[in-house]
């Protein structure tokens, strides 16, 4: 079996019995559940959960899990070239659950050409998703290699600060939350004005006019001011109107670049205030 951690949703390599511990949860950015380390499997998950599909705008399909499981993020199916042909879509971020219904939906929309995941908390069942669509490549930054709990030939580690996935699709290593935390710049998003898909590397906050930045969200550990300023500078050359966050509906829909600028300024000012 391939055990899945109930607290973080990470799927592990095949074993006769679950490991004693989950390194992802024992890291200071995450936590071990109050009841101790618990495990499930994909087969068990399918019995009690289902896929939730929601339109996030711009032709982007949000794919999540109901009832909520583990961290509760949703993946985003991006029509990289307008969704006008087979294999034109990219899946950004991932979830633990996958079933035949999900595969049929994605295939009907053009299938997958690649996957990319913002950071290790969302690696989840990435290998299962890749294999369901013909072992499409999973692009992860090499700085987060140590957090892969289920190695697979489909995983492609890249180095540096930028990687072109295809026309108008650029992975950007932003760091911060994790050393290799990455966002996807989609030039064709927002009607050609651009979009950034960021998981919670840029956390879209409740008023959806700002984003925030954290080293650990569950443990409320902030990032240094210099790191936040660097992230803002790295995104400065890229035009974008929208920022897609980690949760259903968590989208900055207008003036995303200005939202990032004022968010970084507000964050830094709060850290520096007496």
Image: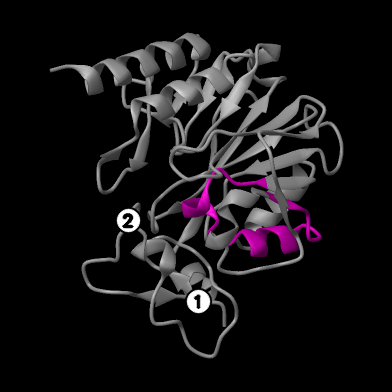
274 is higher (above) or lower (below) than 140: above
Residue at position x 65%, y 26% in the image: 185
Residue at position x 75%, y 39% in the image: 89
Q: Which residue is at the front of the view, 70 or 60?
A: 70
On residue 28, the disc is 2
Identify the element where label 2 is drawn.
loop
Q: Which residue is at the front of the view, 208 or 203?
A: 203
List x then y, in percent, for residue 123.
55, 56
Sooner in the amino-acid sequence: mark 1 or mark 2:
1
Distance in Å between CA atoms under marks 1 and 2: 22 Å
Horizontally, residue 25 falls left or right of residue 190, namely left
Residue 108 shown in magenta: no
Horizontally, residue 15 falls left or right of residue 215, namely right
Residue 138 shown in magenta: yes
Mark 1, other Cα within 10 Å: few <14 / some 14–19 / many ≥20: many
Which quadrant of the structure image shows residue 151? bottom right
225 is higher (above) or lower (below) than 49: above
> Which residues are the magenta region?
116-139
Quarter of the image with the C terminus in it: top left
42 is higher (above) or lower (below) than 119: below
Identify the element where label 1 is drawn.
loop
Q: Which residue is mark 1?
A: 3
List x then y, in percent, for residue 109.
75, 41
Quarter of the image with the N terminus in it: bottom right
Residue at position x 35%, y 25% in the image: 225
């Amino acid at each position: 079996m391939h055990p899945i951690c109930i607290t973080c949703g990470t799927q592990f390599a095949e074993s006769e019995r679950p490991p004693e511990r989950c390194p992802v949860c024992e890291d200071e950015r995450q936590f071990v559940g109050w009841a101790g380390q618990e495990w499930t499997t994909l087969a068990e998950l399918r019995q009690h959960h289902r896929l939730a599909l929601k339109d996030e705008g711009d032709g982007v399909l949000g794919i999540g899990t109901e009832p909520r499981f583990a961290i509760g993020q949703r993946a985003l199916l991006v029509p990289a070239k307008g969704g006008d042909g087979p294999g034109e879509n990219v899946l950004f971020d991932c979830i633990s659950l996958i079933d035949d219904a999900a595969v049929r939906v994605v295939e009907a929309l053009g299938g997958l050409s690649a996957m990319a995941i913002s950071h290790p908390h969302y690696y989840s069942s990435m290998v299962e998703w890749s294999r369901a669509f013909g072992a499409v490549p999973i692009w992860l930054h090499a700085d987060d290699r140590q957090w892969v709990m289920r190695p697979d030939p489909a995983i492609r580690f890249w180095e540096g600060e930028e990687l072109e996935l295809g026309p108008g699709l650029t992975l950007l290593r932003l760091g911060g939350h994790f050393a290799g935390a990455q966002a996807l710049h989609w030039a064709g998003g927002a009607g050609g004005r651009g979009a950034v898909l960021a998981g919670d590397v840029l956390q879209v906050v409740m008023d959806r006019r700002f984003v925030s930045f954290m080293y650990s969200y569950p443990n409320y550990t902030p990032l240094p001011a210099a790191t936040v300023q660097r992230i803002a500078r790295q995104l400065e050359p890229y035009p974008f109107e929208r920022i897609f966050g980690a949760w259903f509906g968590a989208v900055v829909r207008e003036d995303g670049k200005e939202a990032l600028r004022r968010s970084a300024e507000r964050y830094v000012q709060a850290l520096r205030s007496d």
